[in-house]
Amino acid sequence: MKPATSELATLARLETGNEKLDMILGGGFPASSINILMGEPGCGKTIVAESLVFANAGGDRPILYLTTLSEPLDKIVRYLQQFTFYDEAKLGSHVIYESVGDDLVEHGIAGLAPRLKDAITSIRPKIIVIDSFKAIHDLATSVPEMRRMLFEVAGLLTAYDTTAFFVGEYSSHDMARYPEFAVADGVIELARDKLGTRDERYLRVLKLRGSSYLEGLHAFKLSRDGIEVFPRLTTPRFPPQYTQKTERVSTGTGGLDALFGGGMPRGRSTVVLGPTGSGKTTLGLQFVLEGARRGEPGLYVHFEENPTQLAEHVASLEGRAGKADGIGFIYRSPVELQIDSFVSEMYETVRREGVKRVVVDAVGELIVAASDQQRLVWYLYALAQHFAARDVTSVFLYERSALDVPDEPRLSALADNILQLDVDLEGKARRTLRIVKARGIGHDLERHALAIANGRLTVA
Amino acid sequence: MIVPATDSSRSNGPGRLVLVAERDSATRSLESHFLAASGVSVQCVADGQAALELAKSARPEIVITEILIPRIDGLALCRRLKADAETSDTRVLVVSVLAAAVRAREAGADGFLLKPISEDRLVATVKNLLSQEGSRDEARDV
């Protein structure tokens, strides 16, 4: 006999085939559980279920996909073949599609439990998907009838070693009213929000018995490969140890290091505010170029200048055309900017490439693209914390005509340092720079003129 | 309470007798189905008192019991079967939703399986226990 403790400690998981979704679920769905995949029509429920099914197909026990009264079986299988995860060799042997529609028409919802028992005793499925379970709910003629059917079905699915998924067009409102949610061990909601001319898709774990999971909204995209999930960025488990970091990094802008008392502290975040033409992009580029010269990989993220324009800008600063070695560039058109996926990509790039300097040009575009600005600020805060934990020094450019720190408490919380650039357009145009805040270090408080010499920005 | 085995599990043929004590009808039904399909005869009860009485009268070779059953719980049933000279040779397999393998062993159980039911594990364990029983009978016959 195995000791009880080891059996409890190793609660089996059913992986979804999607690493990011498994991460959100704390390793996957608990095995031998009943789960509901819910969301309005078109939100991607069936695709999530089918990709999970094919990821787990194989071995000596098949997977049973039961369609009900919502969509004809032929239609589901026809569209299934459009996806790259579809494997014809597994269909019919490892993945069995059947319709329970006739049983439901003939016997009502009471026809489901006998059909399931027959399937369990004859083909021993390791996973059972019922799509759509909501259609079965809608067929119930009374609440007692529905509860009776659920008692039988849940009893069978709990008794046998199988993991079940009820796919249904439920809304979040249904969760408090429909009894199937009481028998479910896990509930995953998929939703689609309209943002301007674009749609943004999110999934959320509403319930997962006996498991820790990543709460909140997680963006996802649908493609021919199934789903691509972007887990919500949370702050690092262990906060960065600021007191241990005394090293300074050169900003690449002549004279600016001295205003900081020897450069920016490594691993800290800096917000650079300023109106159009004040020199933000130049300052940002000089920051990553300086890092590249010192062997520190850099990442420049930009939404405003397209890659061609930015390449010219870099060439003018470098005094030569060509690729800037040691610096990666990520460009997104503001029109197609989806915050969650973008922030996720940026973070993954920093982690994968060992980036030490990051510039985001500019935060304003992220704010415009964000459907929820508070959510964006939390994202940026978490991102800055992750950067700090990895000793990545970050600069966020933000187009603003004037700074009023009391009006930007969220920005102040995000940034360890705040630089304000300005253009004085009265009389002769003149650029200026001032350090508004530098957390934990002594710094210059004066406004200084900025000059451009040999194409480079310097503190005069 | 003695409950009828399902049609598929009612086996009065030459198969060796296994008694299932399980309160949950779905679990009872599946266990008896899988066991009958493997070639053993199955009788089912829904509580520990009925299991104790049937174990004495029908003399099954194996008693499969959940811990959480009414009247006499599965561990107490196991202890009483093992303490009674009439039934001490009866093999006891605890199949429970509780991760209580150690407690089952302390109660004298010959095997433990954690739910949910896996047909393969259930049938393999029962066959293993039956083979041990057979060996013992042969030894006794000798």
Image: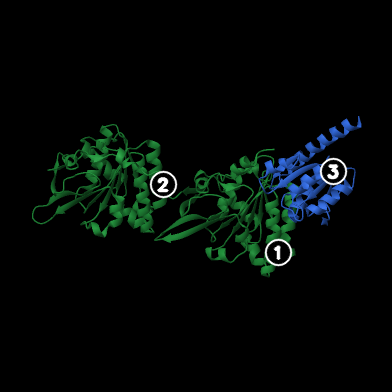
x and y, in percent, of residue A147 in the image: 67, 64
Q: Nearer the viewer, mark 1 or mark 2?
A: 1
What is the spatial separation of the Cα atoms under label 3 and label 2, in whole angstroms? Answer: 64 Å
Asked whether disc 1 touches disc 2, contact meaning CB atoms under 8 Å apart, the reply is no
Q: Chain of mark 1?
A: A
x and y, in percent, of residue A48 in the image: 55, 51
What is the spatial separation of the Cα atoms under label 3 and label 1, in whole angstroms? Answer: 39 Å
As drawn, the chain in blue is B
As drawn, the chain in green is A
Q: Are marks 3 and 2 on the same chain?
A: no
Q: Which residue is mark 2?
A: A344
Q: Chain of mark 3?
A: B
Q: Which disc number belongs to residue A148? A: 1
The quadrant the C terminus of chain A occupies is top left
The amino acid on which the numbered mark 2 sits, given as a three-letter code, is: Ser
* In front of the other: A104 or A216: A216
Q: Are marks 3 and 1 on the same chain?
A: no
Q: Which residue is mark 3?
A: B87
Q: Which disc number belongs to residue A323? A: none
The amino acid on which the numbered mark 3 sits, given as a three-letter code, is: Thr
Residue sitting at x 70%, y 49% = A160
